[in-house]
Amino acid sequence: MSFSDNGFFGQFGGKYVAEVLRRPLDELEIAFKEAMADPSFLEELQQIQRDYIGRETPLLHAETASKILGGAQIYIKLEGLANTGAHKINNAIGQCLLAKRMGKKRIIAETGAGQHGVATAAACAKLGLDCTVYMGEVDVRRQQPNVAAMELYGAKVHSVTSGSRTLKDAVNEAMRDWAANPDTTHYVLGSALGPAPFPDIVREFQSVIGKEVKRQAEERHLDVEALIACVGGGSNSIGFFSPFIDEPGPRLIGVEAGGIGPGIGENASRMTGNASRDGILQGYKSRFLIDEDGQALSTRSISAGLDYCGIGPQLAALGKSGRVEFTSALDKEALEAVKFFAKNEGVLFALESAHAGAEAIKLAPTLSPEKAIIVNMSGRGDKDVFITSPVFRPEKWLDFLHAEIERLESDKDIHEAKIME
Ligand SMILES: *Cc1c(COP(=O)(O)O)cnc(C)c1O
């Protein structure tokens, strides 16, 4: 039931692509279905999830946080403890294994902030696949730590110079590459969106989060009132919600980026904002922040992973039916949540995940202490130090950056080490 009906979830989804991409998408769908019915593939997947990704990830009872808020017990699914620091590796490993099974030795991927690029590059390194990541030139410049990581993992980062030189141009370029090289190449799409069968594939590979949570909650006899996840494209949330969608409870709550406010261009609220419309973009029908001509509107969020104009078609349908409730958190609420859980639980949320944390802070006090709410911490916040430090401690951070530049410009050892390579 939670699988698409021929690529559609209610009125959303589909496969709105150029003719040349139909065959690779159809072949992918067949290979995926066969793989998921093959016990040897599932066993191989499970083994690498355990030994490489580090599954299962813990479910932490946030006791101090729950006491301070004085309501429901908050539990945190520590997905940020997965190797590479976030849930994205679940999908990257799954799709790369699938590509290998299909006999494809070359992987391409798109990336915006770089998180999906890093996960794909790492998965390819682990599985011995050739990897090219398409990334807008603007993003390459501002996301150097992730570019450096991708290169360490041996990936080629292809800087895209067309259009706005950001994520959507990287997607277009990756699609073009795939259309030209379908026999040798698999395109690892990074979230539960895009043309069918990607929304089904990504959800299934991320559903490991929800399956573990279901087992963990049952073992501890939790009376779960709600699951809360942040929603960018929707992969961590749909994977987390997946085993519960066809059941009457618990409440499933998706949190979008509220940015700096409700105005157009100030947020990335596709389900809760007032600027969103049904539309078709980049191969699928869903809810988008687009103008009357179907052109993407600009979006804004302090968290790069939530800063996107579209949302996965299954979530759009589940929002429409009411099974998933949507809300949003402002940039400043996410920052507060980062501080709150760091100080009280010793857990550093990624800025994306902190949007879900912010909703837990609002919801917990309205519920009784016998109830549990579970927050998916989709990633850990180490990667955000260049964003959080300038906010939390601007002068000290500026001093540090100045000192680093000075050190790099003056330190002969660094130059010599480079020459010795
Ligand atoms: C990319 C990312 C997200 C947003 O993507 P979804 O597909 O909505 O899950 C959320 N959290 C983290 C840590 C991310 O890296």
Image (cartoon, grey):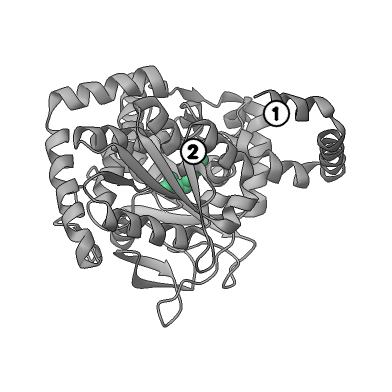
Foreground of the two, 205 or 182: 182
Is residue 123 left or right of 157 when viewed as pictured?
A: left
Label 2 packing within 10 angstroms: few (<14), some (14-19), many (20+): many
Image location (x, y in percent) of residue 186:
28, 45
Q: Is residue 178 visible?
A: yes
* First reached walking from the N terminus: tag 2 or tag 1: 2
Amino acid at pointer 1? Lys
Q: Is residue 151 above or below residue 296?
A: above
Q: Is residue 362 above or below residue 256?
A: above
Q: Residue at x 34, y 24 (%)?
A: 49
Question: Quadrant of residue 365 in the image?
Answer: top right
**Residue tagged by mark 2?**
118
Image location (x, y in percent) of residue 241:
33, 42
Amino acid at pointer 2? Val
**Residue tagged by mark 1?**
418
Is residue 8 left or right of 89 when viewed as pictured?
A: left
